[in-house]
Amino acid sequence: MSDNESPAVTYGSYLEVDKLLDLQRPRSEEHDELLFIAIHQVYELWFKVLLHELDRVMQLLRDDDAMRAQHTLKRVLTILKVLVAQVDILETMTPLEFLTFRNRLAAASGFQSDQFRQLEFVMGNKSRAAIDRFAADSRARVGLEARWAAPTLWDAFLQYLKREGHDVPPEQLSRDVTAPIEPSPEVQRILIDVYRKDPKTSELCERLVDLDEGLQEWRYRHIKMVERTIGAKPGTGGSAGAQYLRTTLGKAAFPDLWEIRASL
């Protein structure tokens, strides 16, 4: 190989396998800690991909490309099914097996996953308290601040509806994107009309409902896994554990798409 030639790309070099395999560093000799670390690192990788794909969905909506937006949402939904399936793997670890290394986690908790918080922000569930948990200028803080100020997936959808000729109220199009997404009777009337007269857009609505439901399914399985593993004990890092997680269930990301069901 001459001095000007680059080394041949291999499977290992392209995927940086050596670096990847060096990232699992158990703090004990307990057998199950490696599984725990690997599963949660894989979750973070999937969160990264989900954010990437949802950014793509929003861009496709801005481009008025509903068909490709639907296709990308189907990919997101398939990834969510993988996240749920990973809970099955974690549940092969008994409470006693988890307790053998739990104290090694110290204050570390899934509550501190900034990427999951970014996913929540994209879906419209934004919180300044979630941002304030991270140090100024950290990667996590910068990412969350950007998501805080950016329009949500729902905002991108409303703008798309407007460009498709639907009479979306101006106050919905200019709403505070940091505020919770609240039900709107005016938007609901538009959506009912969409379902009755606009098959292309109604299919897109159904994919958004699938996304909302898919996230709720993952939350539910996560709660049951926590209850199965630690019961009513406080969560790692001092959180309220399953008790807190239950408060996140049942909150629809896109309430208008659920409210119209009784009127269709």
Image (spheres, rainbow, N blue to C red):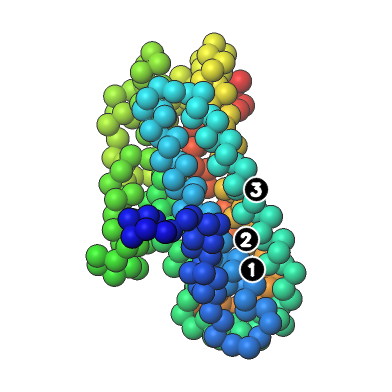
Query: Label 1 sits on what residue type?
Result: Val
Q: List the residue tagged with mark 3.
A: 81
Residue 145 versus residue 102 in the image, above or below: above
Q: Secondary structure at mark 3?
A: helix
Q: Quadrant of residue 61?
A: top left
Please give left or right for residue 53 compared with residue 95 in the image. Answer: left
Q: Residue furthest left?
A: 137
Would you call the spot at circle 2 few (<14 residues within 10 Å), some (14-19), or many (20 or more)? many
Q: Quadrant of residue 206?
A: top right
At x 40%, y 16%, the residue is: 164
At x 47%, y 42%, the residue is: 53
Q: Secondary structure at mark 1?
A: helix
Query: Label 2 sits on what residue type?
Result: His
Q: Secondary structure at mark 2?
A: helix
Label 3 to label 1: alpha-carbon separation: 18 Å
Q: List the residue tagged with mark 1.
A: 226
Q: Are marks 2 and 1 in contact (CB under 8 Å)?
A: yes
Q: Are marks 3 and 1 in contact (CB under 8 Å)?
A: no
- Mark 3 or 1, nearer chain start: 3
Q: List the residue tagged with mark 2.
A: 222
Residue 251 image offset from top left, x and y in percent: 52, 47
- Quick check: can you spot residue 240? no
Please give left or right for residue 145 compared with residue 260 in the image. Answer: left
Query: Nearer the viewer's eye, disc 3 or disc 2?
Result: 3
Query: Label 3 sits on what residue type?
Result: Lys
Residue 25 versus residue 81 in the image, above or below: below
- Mark 3 or 2, nearer chain start: 3
Query: Nearer the viewer's eye, disc 3 or disc 1?
Result: 3
Q: Quadrant of the C terminus?
A: top right
